[in-house]
Amino acid sequence: MDIAISVVIPTYNRKALLDKTLQALTRQTLAKEHFEVIVVDDGGSDDSEALCQRYQNRLNIRYYWQRDQGFRAGKARNIGITAADGDYIVLIDTGVLLHQQALERHLNTHCHSSYPVVCIGYVYGFEMPDALLDNLCNAINADDVAASVSYFQKNRAGDIRQSQYDEFGYNISAWPAPFDIFWTCHVSAEKTALLEAGLFDETFNGWGGEDVDLGVRLFLQNNRFVVNTSICSIHFPHQKLIADHKQESENAGKKIHQKYQLWQTAFYGCDLGESKFSLNKVIRCCADQNRSENDAFIRKYLYRS
């Protein structure tokens, strides 16, 4: 069996959502023998193992469990990546339903690239207002995610990062900090690149930060970051473990800058009063402000002359 892609899914007491994620994976156009699914349970107690066993005939699936010692999604993903047989790793969250052609398109992206690639998946419905998503839940079909994507498109329930794509373009490798949108709800990378980067920093044991932190190291290793809206998925609405991520994001940003001391990460300390996902916006605005101040100084100098 020639496994090309390993799909790694951390989970914790979300059996119903995991079921939808696995069901969508059974509909992939990529042949079953070319991908595997690795579920790593972060100490859950909802019998997700039995659910995974029920998919044994439809997926090449493995299940791992680690003791519940708090939020350890980074460690869970590390277990999955280390155990993976595929050359390419697709990381998704429980509750993310991949488009039927997603794995095939991930594989094509990596195989046709002459350099290491980090692929950012487009996630419909991700971080959308609850009022909007409540009306879309009934349109989500794990057996036909493509049809569900079309419905989300018609109702403008896109990815929360769409505003950044609109402003900065889809060539994210040209962004000053593409690693800021390396969110493991749906991404892929070469296994060797992930290992060389040192995998996830397991000291991130609260919500957020461990994915962007790894993204920084992949960026420093000259992986090229790409996004393709046809490599997409749907984020099934569910109750958030943390209602407001602002403080957690600020803490993670400070920790990341302390580790790497990059000029880009220094902007995590700036606040424009916008959402937590605005590092590239902050950099752009600060650059524009500095440019305006420099232009004003030059005009003043020339006028005095």
Image (cartoon, grey):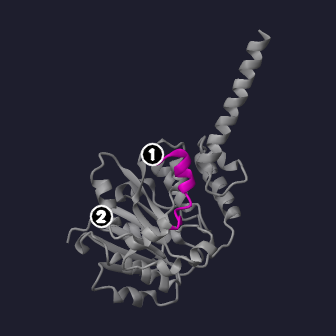
Magenta stretch contains residue 169: yes
Question: For the point 62% across and 69% down, which residue is it?
Answer: 129
Q: Nearer the viewer, residue 34 or 155?
A: 155
Residue at label 1? 171
On screen, residue 189 above or below 206: above
The vertical placement of 223 against 68, above or below, is above
Q: Position of residue 224 (x, y in %)?
A: 41, 47
Which of the 4 quarters of the picture holds residue 105? Answer: bottom left
Q: Is residue 140 above or below residue 302?
A: below
Numbered range of the magenta stretch: 155-171
Left of 29 or right of it: where is 208? right
Circle 1 packing at 10 Å, graded few (<14), some (14-19), many (20+), is: few
User: Residue at left 64%, top 36%?
Assistant: 287
Q: Is residue 290 left or right of residue 52?
A: right
Q: Is 4 inside the magenta-drawn segment?
A: no
Element type where label 2 sits in the image: helix
